[in-house]
């Protein structure tokens, strides 16, 4: 009865031509993540052309509702009640637990309040020192490639992992010099398995899941990931018990959690959940954003040169100069470049909310248990907002004058409202510092055409061709 009611209410919302039982499942069969992303973007354009600003997609027994512009996404984004995450987290739930990413209700509200001070500006200043340190190592590692073509993605990921290990746990993993580190390999395997599980429905049937060997691989990978973080937490607890504690702005994320642990406000499992969540969220999204940023400037030499000129003007030509938050505040063009890269290639292309109650949005009643897809990549490729050249890379879209004319929710790369990305300021600063070090040290180019690099939504937006570039060292 519940499913019939959900379908009946959902069918009053504009929708696609679908199979009456399977919906669009037959159209998605066999598509990779890039194919599904392209399908959604194409259907969204078609629905806008028909005059709709929201539409629904039936997929077997699931109903997805997709807002198409900032105005229609606003009610669900701003809701303080409908904060329950939807699909896409089942596979990683045992790894991350119900930390801040997945939890809902009172637990989410309590953890959010507890963790928010971690990202206060006074702590960010200390984090920027870490961003600089590991970005400098990144430059040294890339310099050793001697200008040959390379895929920038794994290098950027390893730099981001070093950053997050130190800021989250106070531990230097040095994976940039040790790319075969067990944690790096386990993290790679877990993210690969998650994508396989989401795209290949046969894994949803337990007999096949076990027969294929994925269940065993998952267990081994999970043991490595949990073993690494639990080991660091245990080590840090012992040092704190012996009086070794960080103070003030030098306090890292783990120490702040352990202060709450000492006060009885969070247990061992809670500490582990949040550390694993921060490790995952804190490196994957940033590395996606920086990777696509490099891709964009490598294909737009005039943008790259203007950005290099601004860096030299603000910081100077010394390639060893530490980059500060005061420097970054003066780099208006850097801000525009990063925003445009995040618009065209949203690091987190979509998130979901599963409705706990019927939800009125404009003239439509969204039924309970429907999944609302909040898709920054759909909003950021809306021709009615961004123009017919929506697929071109143009940082001038984010000039002060042009920004003021858009709905604020037409551009939400870090979501918005009560469930926005708690670490967005952290991620933005890290991406800018990393990009500054790279651009002032190298001139990037690529032989692969700009538009040919397909993008797939896999939690983050993955470049299917990687980021194949040449990095010519600047004099």
Image (cartoon, rainbow, N blue to C red):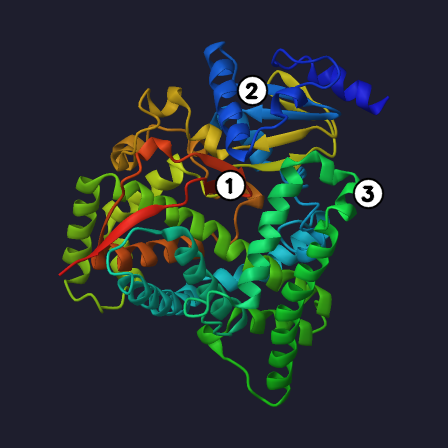
Left/right placement of residue 29 relative to residue 447 reads: right
Between label 3 and label 2, give the one nearer the viewer.
3
Q: CA distance from mark 1 to mark 3?
A: 40 Å
Residue labelled with disc 3? 207
Between label 1 and label 3, give the one nearer the viewer.
3
Q: Earlier along the polypeptide chain: callout 3 or callout 2?
A: 2
Q: Position of residue 386 (x, y in %)?
A: 35, 25
Residue 220's disc number: none
User: Residue 115 appears in which quarter of the rendering?
Assistant: bottom right
Q: Position of residue 23 (x, y in %)?
A: 69, 18
SS class, disc 2? strand
Q: Tell me what residue is drawn at x 57 percent, y 44 percent.
A: 418
Residue 416's disc number: 1
Residue 54's disc number: 2
Q: Tell me what residue is drawn at x 49 percent, y 72 percent.
A: 173
SS class, disc 1? loop
Give the total of numbered labels. Answer: 3
Q: Position of residue 33 (x, y in %)?
A: 55, 34
Give the class, few, some or many, for how many residues have Cα within 10 Å of label 2's Cα (few <14, many ≥20): many
**Residue 334 versus residue 305: which sits nearer the camera?**
305
Q: Tell me what residue is drawn at x 58 percent, y 50 percent.
A: 191
Give the class, few, some or many, for how many residues have Cα within 10 Å of label 3's Cα (few <14, many ≥20): few
Q: Tell me what residue is drawn at x 66 percent, y 52 percent.
A: 109
Left/right placement of residue 212 relative to residue 415 reads: right
């Amino acid at each position: 009865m519940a499913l019939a009611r959900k379908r009946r209410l959902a069918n009053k919302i504009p929708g696609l031509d679908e199979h009456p039982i399977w919906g669009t499942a037959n159209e998605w069969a066999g598509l990779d993540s890039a194919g599904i992303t392209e399908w959604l973007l194409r259907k969204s354009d078609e629905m806008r052309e028909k005059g709709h600003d929201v539409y629904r997609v039936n997929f077997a027994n699931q109903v997805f509702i997709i807002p198409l512009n900032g105005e229609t996404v606003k009610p669900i984004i701003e809701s303080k009640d409908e904060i329950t995450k939807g699909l896409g987290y089942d596979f990683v739930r045992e790894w991350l637990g119900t930390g801040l990413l997945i939890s809902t209700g009172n637990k989410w509200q309590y953890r959010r309040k507890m963790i928010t001070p971690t990202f206060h500006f006074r702590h960010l200043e200390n984090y920027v020192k870490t961003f600089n340190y590991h970005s400098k190592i990144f430059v040294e590692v890339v310099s050793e490639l001697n200008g040959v073509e390379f895929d920038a993605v794994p290098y950027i990921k390893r730099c981001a992992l070093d950053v997050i290990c130190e800021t989250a746990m106070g531990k230097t993993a040095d994976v940039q010099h040790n790319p075969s580190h067990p944690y790096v390999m386990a993290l790679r395997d877990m993210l690969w398995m998650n994508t396989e599980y989401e795209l290949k429905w046969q894994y949803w049937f337990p007999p096949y899941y076990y027969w294929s060997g994925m269940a065993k691989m998952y267990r081994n990978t999970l043991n490595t990931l949990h073993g690494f973080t639990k080991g660091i937490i245990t080590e840090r607890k012992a040092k704190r018990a012996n009086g070794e504690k960080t103070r003030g702005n030098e306090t890292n994320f783990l120490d702040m959690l352990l202060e709450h642990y000492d006060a009885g406000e969070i247990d061992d499992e809670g500490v582990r959940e949040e550390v694993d969540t921060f490790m995952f969220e804190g490196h994957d999204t940033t590395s996606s954003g920086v990777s696509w940023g490099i891709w964009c400037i490598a294909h737009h030499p005039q943008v790259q040169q203007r950005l290099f000129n601004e860096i030299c003007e603000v910081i100077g030509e010394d390639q060893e100069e530490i980059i500060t938050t005061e420097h970054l505040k003066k780099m208006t063009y850097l801000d525009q470049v990063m925003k445009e890269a995040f618009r065209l290639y949203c690091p987190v292309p979509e998130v979901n909310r599963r409705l706990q109650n019927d939800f009125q949005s404009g003239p439509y009643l969204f039924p309970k248990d429907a999944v609302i897809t909040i898709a920054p990549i759909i909003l950021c490729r809306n021709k009615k907002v961004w123009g017919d050249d929506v697929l071109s890379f143009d940082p001038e879209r984010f000039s002060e004058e042009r920004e003021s004319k858009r709905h604020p929710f037409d551009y939400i790369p870090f979501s918005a409202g009560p469930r926005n990305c708690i670490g967005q300021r952290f991620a933005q600063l890290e991406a800018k510092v990393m990009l500054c070090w790279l651009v002032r040290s190298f001139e990037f180019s690529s032989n692969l055409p700009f538009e040919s690099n397909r993008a797939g939504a896999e939690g983050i937006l993955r470049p299917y061709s990687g980021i194949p570039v040449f990095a010519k060292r600047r004099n």
